[in-house]
Amino acid sequence: MAKIKLTILILILIAASMVSIIAGPSVTFDRDILLRIRLPRVFEAVIAGSSLSVAGVIFQGVLKNPLSDPYILGTSSGALLGAIICFMSGIGHSNVLFYPVVVFFAFGATVSSYFLARTDKNVSNVNLLLAGVVVSTFLTALVIAYLTLNRENALNIFSFVMGGFYQTDKTVLAVAFVFSMAGIITAGILSRYLDVMSLGDEKAVQLGLDANKIKFIFFGLAALITGCAVSVSGTIGFVGLLVPHVARLIFGPAHLRLLLVSGIGGAVFLILADCIARSVFSPAELPVGIITALSGAPFFLWLLRRSRANASE
Amino acid sequence: MPVLEVKNLSFGYNGAGVLKNVSFSLDKGDFTGILGHNGSGKSTLLKIISGILTSDSGAILLNGKPVLSYSRQETARLIGHVPSEIFVPYEFTVFETVLMGRSPYLNWWQGYGRRDFIKTHEVLERAGISHLKNRHLNSLSSGEKQLVFIAQALAQEPEILILDEPTSHLDINHKIEIFALLSGLIKEKGISVIVVTHDLNLAAGYCNKILLLRNGETIYFGNTREGLETEKISRSYGVKNTEALKRIMKGLTA
């Protein structure tokens, strides 16, 4: 049964890619447009979508918190700040230093949210949300301040802040793809730890795990994966929240399967979101982050209400 | 040699003493009940034994060696801890949940193997919940859920099983079912059990030893019959109406 569902999902991925490549803002079979413009875009959506979704699965599992994802915890804004700092200091995408800096900031922001939320060795779901809001608001403020002071670059970076697929450099895409895949595969190998962690820290310790160490390893993996996504396409919200939840409803919570399915599902989601973003007001183009936020925010509210209802039972 | 020895254990949260100088020991095959009022330090004691909390002073010996000399995984192969209540926000199946009890036997890169699946089936069978194996955790009654986490702890193949109020939300039928399961396991597998409970009836019926706590101090440790005397129970729980307690205790030990 699960195999059939997985096959269907893969078929949907292929179909979505075809639609996005051929249909785009207008149907065309021009070889140059298809291969040089639309194909890299779809590939970018695949990298960003699967990375952000997998990072969401990791956070939701390791923190036993269904309301977390890289956008909410500040991981994405950390990566964004890292990228902006790189641009400021003249370190571009092609510089080897770029990725470590971005990942370092993503990790730093995540750990900050986590420790801000922690009181007496306990991290409540609500505290974590609040801490995430504080951290990402602060970091985004820094980014906006930079944008305001450097108007000549603003338009370029603005699209980066709202998220979008404008990166067409093949090397950049390849590097981001390789590193994010490495992170995703590592998460897959370690997936049984996510299962145990989603029973809570205490249970994990009772089952012989070093809960704190595991948490930081997964924070590191999620930062790496998110950093890759943000490097190519900026911050895109709600993907990491929406996709894992839908995947869990259909495929169950066991993490090995969930990581795989969310990876594919995230790719499908962003391919379609991007397709909509550039078609609806064509020739003008919306940042893809607008589409994901418009669909993701109501979903998040619904989740929040549901988790409150569960908690008060 | 006792399987578990707790010596002069003290522990405090932020300076407030929760446990003061607690000592007791557990022999192979013991069924020990820990009793005391709410906040007397019972759950904290269990958490220290299973390594979730570290004591401020005193020692815990597992098979004669200090508990801190074991790795976490080694400890988890010796002690199975069933918490009083556990909320899981995701819909794992019973089988998936019990399988996680095999974690202490896996290297970090390893996934579950054939042996782990066989063992999981075996403990599901033993706990009498094989028929629930494909059900979702949150669709179960609290009694069934309790059995799932007991089965998970059994999958750890522990020498000591500790349970924190396993029957507090259950009716008498399910209470007996769980205590009978525990006492059966002691006979079959030669394990030892520590159970925190508020239920004097069950303690009288199943435990061979009891530990009475009051405000983190030991009131009594020893065999159950002597421990369940009116005077000790009333001291441990601070019972004011001793006449009524006497009447109840008479029925218990008869």
Image: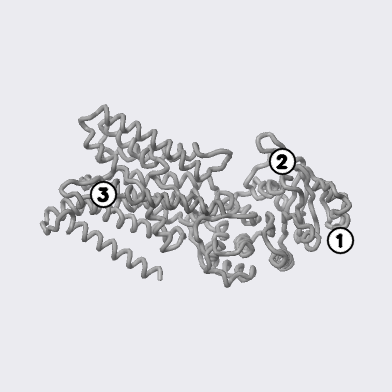
Give the residue type that dot 3 points to: Ala
Amino acid at the residue labelled 1: Thr
Picture residue at 35% right of the left edge, 35% below the top? A140
Q: Residues within 10 Å of mark 1 (few under 14, many from 20)?
A: some
Is residue A304 at all visible to an observer of this figure?
yes
Please tell me the numbered disc located at residue B150: none
Q: Are marks 2 and 3 on the same chain?
A: no
Mark 3, residue position: A174
Q: Which residue is mark 1?
A: B253
Disc 1 is attached to a residue of which chain?
B
Crowd rating for badge 2 (residues with CA inside 10 Å; few <14, some 14–19, many 20+): many
Residue at 12% x, 53% y: name it: A32
Q: Position of residue B206 (x, y in %)?
A: 78, 62
Amino acid found under the numbered disc labelled 2:
Val
Q: Earlier in the sequence, mark 2 or mark 1?
A: 2
Q: Are marks 2 and 1 on the same chain?
A: yes
Spatial CA distance of label 2 from label 3 is: 57 Å
Residue shown at the point (73%, 50%) measured from the top left: B64
Provide the secondary structure element on which disc 2 rests.
strand
Q: Tell me the residue that label 2 is attached to.
A: B18
x, y percent for residue A52: 36, 49
From the image, state whether disc 2 or disc 3 is nearer to you. 2
Spatial CA distance of label 2 from label 1 is 30 Å
